[in-house]
Amino acid sequence: MPLVSPAEMFKKAYSGGYAVGAFNVNNMEIIQGIMSAGEEERAPLILQVSAGARKYAGQDYIIKLMEAAVARTDLPVALHLDHGQDYTICKEVIEAGFTSVMIDGSHLPYEENIKVTKAVVECAHDKGVWVEGELGVLAGVEDEVRAEKTIYTDPDQAVEFVQRTGCDSLAIAIGTSHGAYKFKQGSNPTLDFERLEKIGKLLPGYPIVLHGASSVPQEFVDMANKYGGKIGSAVGVPEELLRKAASMAVCKINIDTDIRLAMTAIIRKHFAEKPEDFDPRSYLKPAREAVKQMVQRKMRNVLGCSGKA
Ligand SMILES: O=C(CO)COP(=O)(O)O
Ligand SMILES: O=C[C@H](O)COP(=O)(O)O
Ligand SMILES: [Zn+2]
Ligand SMILES: [Zn+2]
């Protein structure tokens, strides 16, 4: 099945009270792990590529791998640009065949964010490509820029932003953040559901996106640390909070850190148990299986998208 736009996926997710997972891909094993999870769960999928992934793998490689993946499946799969920094990068991937792009102007002054988002919308809509904008700033590291504090999305400004830019979905800040260290250990992680509800009411039927939505399962932190890792006091967003958000206006939930964590923990365990091993296939195979299981766990516990494709 060819790559699809996320439009139909989000429509169904919104009315069905679930969300579609957007998983970051960097290599073949990650793509294969996500695809087999999707197959087993019969779930729609968004595969997303960051600037870092394009640099690491090469955009041509990623696209070829994606083509191979979608040729083997009848699942709806969208190919999305994660955190597009500017107009040029968005235009480039639109021309390369991505079906969805994020223009992340969230660190710019408001009017500049509007200007660049609007320009990307014009270019993308010409080709039937979906555009995700972002308003508000997540704490944590993003594209090598560190924001110390969350700037929560203002609901009225969100409405104006969507109206003035014409973007198709909006990433908002309600307390999630990128990476493994989202909350202080021993604290009580919360999300601003009141704000989400308000935005949902002001923009009825409109798909909202959550970035920084990994849950950092403790068992994987423990496994990595047990076998030589030094991951420390990593705390993510509790799964039940994300499930609640998915039942509200949130239609897309971004997950990267948990995939990294699962692969790393399993590879560390493998090397600790088989120090004599040096065949990449023998450690990448369990890593690929770990990606699959992590993604399945997300689909069942967080997204609620199993059986929706
Ligand atoms: O938002 C993300 C990618 O855009 C990933 O978030 P995590 O770091 O929480 O997995
Ligand atoms: O939001 C960031 C994603 O987790 C991608 O991370 P990256 O820029 O290291 O590829
Ligand atoms: Zn951003
Ligand atoms: Zn993100």
Image (cartoon, rainbow, N blue to C red):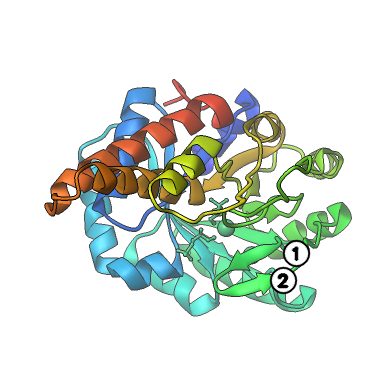
Pick the residue in front: 19 or 95.
19
Pick the residue in front: 149 or 156.
149
Picture coordinates of residue 267, whole percent (x, y): 30, 47
Q: From the viewer's perspective, is residue 141 above or below residue 239?
A: below
Residue drawn at x 66%, y 36% is 238
Q: From the viewer's perspective, is residue 250 above or below residue 151?
A: above
Pointers 2 and 1 in contact (C-beta within 8 Å): yes
Pick the residue in front: 36 or 155.
36
Q: Quadrant of residue 110?
A: bottom right
- Kindly tell me whether residue 304 is visible in this rendering: no
Specify the quadrant that holds the C terminus: top left
Residue drawn at x 84%, y 60% is 157
- Which residue in the structure is indicated by mark 2? 114
Specify the quadrant that holds the N terminus: top left
Picture coordinates of residue 54, whole percent (x, y): 36, 68
Residue drawn at x 70%, y 37% is 249
- Per the image, label 1 sits on a secondary structure element best described as helix
Q: Earlier in the sequence, mark 2 or mark 1?
A: 2
Pick the residue in front: 183 or 100.
183
* Circle 2: residue type: Ile
- Per the image, label 2 sits on a secondary structure element best described as helix
Q: CA distance from mark 2 to mark 1?
A: 7 Å
Task: Give left or right: position of 144 versus 228.
Answer: right
* Circle 1: residue type: Arg
Picture coordinates of residue 25, whole percent (x, y): 37, 54
Tell which tag, 2 or 1, sits nearer the viewer. 2
Q: Quadrant of residue 102?
A: bottom right
Numbered badge on residue 164: 1
